[in-house]
Amino acid sequence: MPSNARTAAEFVALLRTAKNRSGLSYRALERKARKVGDHLPVSTLASALSRGSLPKEDVVAALIRAFGGDPATVNEWGEVRAALAQRESSARAEDVPWLSQALPGLAAGRGAENEGGGTSRQLVPCLLPADQSLFVGRQDELSTACRVLDREGPGPVILLVTGPAGVGKTAFAVRAGHLLASRFPDGQLYVDLRGFDDEPAEPFTVLGAFLRALGLRGGAVPPEMTGRIHLYRTLLAQRQTLIVLDNAADARQVSDLLPNGARCAAVITSRTTLADMSGHRLPLGVLDSATGLALLREMLGPDRTAAESDSARSIVETCGRLPLAVWVAGARLAARPHWPLEKVARALADEQRKLDELAVGHIAVRASLELTYRAMTPTTQHALRMLSLLPTADFGAWALAALLGVGLSEAENVLDDLVEVHLVGVRAVGATGFRYQLHDLVRVLARERARSEVGRQERAAALTRLLGTSLDLADLAADTLSVDFQGVSQTDLVSWRLSPTDTDQLLVTPLDWFTEERQFLISVADQALDRADIAPAAGLATALTTLFQVGSHFDDWERLQERSLKAALHVGDKRSASQLHRCLGELTTILDRYPEALAHFEQALLLAEGLGPSYRASATAGLAYVHRLLGQYAAAVLHFEEAAELARVAGNVNCLVYATNGIGVIDLEHGRVEAAMERFTECLRVSRSEGYRPGEAQALRCLGQSHRALGSYAPAADSFRLAAAISEDLGDRLGATHATCWLGDVLVRQGAPREGRRLLARSLWTYREFGNLWGEAATLYALAEAQLSVGRPEQARRRAEAAVALWRHIGARAWLATGLETLAKAHALAGDHVAAAQARDAAAAARTAQGGSGR
């Protein structure tokens, strides 16, 4: 009998005994309860019968009915439970004076006897705002929230919903609360804590409102903070209640408002990360483009958005896909059905008007962002203003360090504060640290503040530091990679630089750093050119040459340096113009545009008059290389020798190796193999001694060609393999392809045609990807030789003809003759002796022309 219970634990033990006697499983009890209209989930049953605390009244009643108890038995169990609950409350009240005062008020709301002799139902607070009918997207996030909040554990579930201002945290929390209302039958408490307002809600006041919502009469609410906290926790300890604490400033504002009941849950929203709180984290980001369009479509109707689909997409994108901004733009249009969408799209595209356009009624995106801004410290506000000066929204911490003129760790600390309030986002974690991003609308606000609160001279000084740091880091990265042979430092153009410790941290892997920073560095150079800061901008464009070359970023290379060259010539900066002509000569050589390359190198030399040997050495070496490719050997040797002498005077070992190697290639192409190998061996020795790895790879490729010319295919293959490995390690795909192409050729000659053709086919696609015609021709020639080796004259003919056409197009006479000789062999193998004779005659003519051009 329930009357035998003297404590809550004994009462629960009697319930367990009754359950065992019934012989019913939890699942069977759930089904029986459902038949008579009760809701008794298995999880609730298991929880109620496994604890030492009193189950809820409705759970006890439903359980007894499921056991088969009649109404009188149900009432008996209910009365015993109510008496035990009253006894426990009285015992607590003896130790807590305010509790005894509150109990009469509680009785009015929980289990108090009414005139009919029964008990009144518990007061159930429902403080959640109305659910929005216009709610688009977030299905994955809602599923996660419902899954988290619907589970039971040893303590209350805490869900932390964080994100920037305007991302829709409140709407999300309210929607989740309504979806889970049945999971929390004891009600839902809600409060807007106004954490970033001038007057945020005080926990003391909130607790008073919550206690009254839970059924206390006004006079029963304790007058002091400790009493309110204790009573609030006592009331929630036995309930299933959801508490939504919206727009919290920090953990301190919510810590006293959290429930302690194991069956309760709390949803906390904040535009900070709430890093010092425990709970399940659910960050909300901006909408994807499709969802943003869906939101606009719901507000304006499908016909209106479809009629101006481009403008609709523009509105979503210029709002940065921020839900609040898209909603405001949609609300303005919805209230003005006669407005074309293009009118708002055009207004939003104007940065000066964007934030003013995003306001409707009392709701404004600017006001929402400014609440966060005003709550920050002056240091963090200043950092945000300076970040708006960056040429892109995506950046690394070193960029802020340069803008502020501080160390890297200090900049990272400030960025942590900005990330905490979601004004800056962490976009990715790269090889050199975090990459950050400013939302477009935050950037607009920050620029407005910068214009009004930061002087013009201070802004200019910050951008000068940014440009100088970018140039210094790019120059150091290029020097560390040691790929180029230019040998001209840009350090005299650097106005500010990071400490050596910070620099070393960033450039542990220079190529990774450049890969992550390439677009940012290009934007910094473009920004400086816009500001007419020509010399350092041209210096940065020049410093990026090595990095562009290694990464094969030829379009970026040409566009930036052509623009920089035009600016340098306009202001008469001969030094910058000479360097840029030299770099563009290197690019056009790689792209097989030999007449342009010759013109660039010649202009570089003309402008370098009086600038010293460092400026002339590399341009002279580049000029010599183009003459060699064109079969103009006398001019090539003359320029290579001059470049080598200038390099010795300047101490430019890289250029000296490059020029010496070039003379060796001419020896090789004239059949002076022994003399060529001596030069290549010396280049290899010096390159290894100086750590010039690109020179080492080039010398190995040339030694491989020498062994190939002698018919020593095994050492040739070894040299090509090692050269390819070095180039791949450097990230130089084009250099690696040069070695791989000739390795394929050698493998065919060694009797491994299948593997050789596979490497040649791979090389062919890479050359075509880069638009390298000389490499494509060389690969086609090697493929023709491979087909000849297995007796396929028709396939060999097609490839040889393609190679000949390319070499004729780019003017490479020596290799044109070689290709024609292979074509002659293909015709001969096919039995077409007339065509073979014609190809041999053409080859002889090409070699005669080659010899004449070399005199």
Image (tube, grey):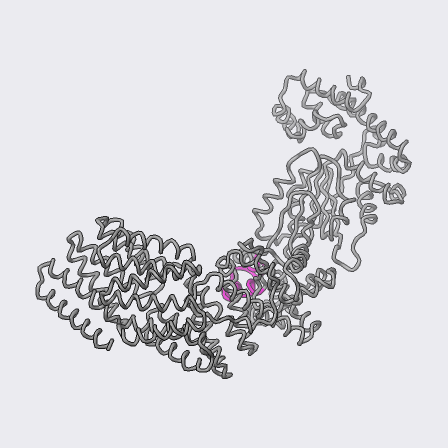
Which span of residues is magenta-colored? 295-318
Relative to 659, does residue 119 appear above or below in the rendering? above
Question: In the image, 422: left or right of 315?
Answer: right
Main SS of the magenta part reads helix
Q: Quadrant of residue 827?
A: bottom left
Tell me residue 447's x, y (percent).
64, 69
Residue 338 visible at all: no
Quadrant into which the N terminus falls: top right
Tell me residue 86's x, y (percent).
85, 29
Relative to 263, does residue 13 appear above or below in the rendering? above
Observer-nearest of 399 and 98: 399
Tell me residue 74's x, y (percent).
75, 23
Residue plotted at (77% across, 48% down): 252
Quadrant into which the C terminus falls: bottom left
Observer-nearest of 445 and 781: 781
Residue 10 visible at all: yes
Tell me residue 163's x, y (percent).
64, 54
Question: In the image, 389: left or right of 230?
Answer: left
Question: In the image, 533: left or right of 420?
Answer: left
Asked if the stretch drawn in magenta spans residue 217, the answer is no
Observer-nearest of 818 and 237: 818
Q: Quadrant of residue 404?
A: bottom right
Label tally? 0
Asked if the stretch drawn in magenta spans residue 310, the answer is yes
